[in-house]
């Protein structure tokens, strides 16, 4: 069983992971872009497109309580479903 608070922490952690992966990948792509092909800044398109998704994810988690609660409830449901499957398999 997972508590509401634990599910909310998972939702927040999911955003932090998303943001960290974004920063790492975009930094790598920009380094690659600047060292291999500095006259065409294609990595900016990746940063902007994916960045919009990260911003939307952050707003859903931190600025919109309805979206956050929906994500929390989805997390609770998913964890309980996994626990049931695990209990039935043993």
Image (spheres, rainbow, N blue to C red):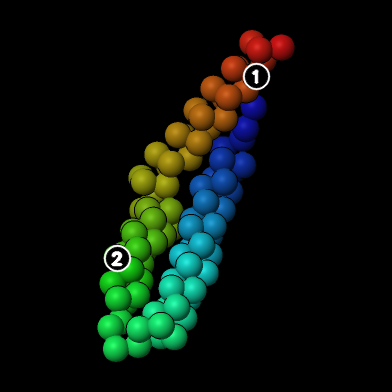
SS under mark 1: helix
Residue 48 is left or right of residue 31, and the answer is: left
Which of 81 and 20 lies nearest the eye of the viewer? 20
Residue that appears at 46% across and 34% down:
73
Residue 85 is left or right of residue 68, and the answer is: right
The residue indicated by pointer 1 is 86
The residue indicated by pointer 2 is 49
Position of residue 3 measured from the top left corner of the image (x, y, whole percent): 61, 35
- Find out whether the residues at labels 2 and 1 contact each other: C-beta distance under 8 Å: no
Q: How crowded is mark 2: few (under 14 residues within 10 Å), some or many (20 or more)?
A: few
Position of residue 9 measured from the top left corner of the image (x, y, whole percent): 58, 48
**Count of marks overlaid on the render:** 2
Position of residue 54 measured from the top left corner of the image (x, y, whole percent): 39, 61
Residue that appears at 51% across and 29% down:
78
Position of residue 37 measured from the top left corner of the image (x, y, whole percent): 35, 83
Does the image show residue 31? yes
Image quadrant in which the N terminus is located: top right
Residue that appears at 49% across and 74% down:
28
């Amino acid at each position: 069983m997972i508590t509401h608070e634990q599910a909310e922490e998972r939702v927040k952690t999911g955003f932090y992971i998303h943001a960290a992966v974004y920063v790492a990948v975009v930094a790598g792509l920009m380094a690659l872009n600047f060292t291999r092909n500095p006259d065409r800044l294609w990595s900016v398109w990746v940063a902007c497109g994916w960045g919009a998704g990260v911003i939307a994810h952050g707003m859903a988690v931190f600025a919109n309580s309805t979206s956050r609660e929906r994500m929390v409830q989805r997390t609770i449901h998913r964890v309980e479903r996994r626990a049931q499957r695990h209990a039935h398999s043993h």
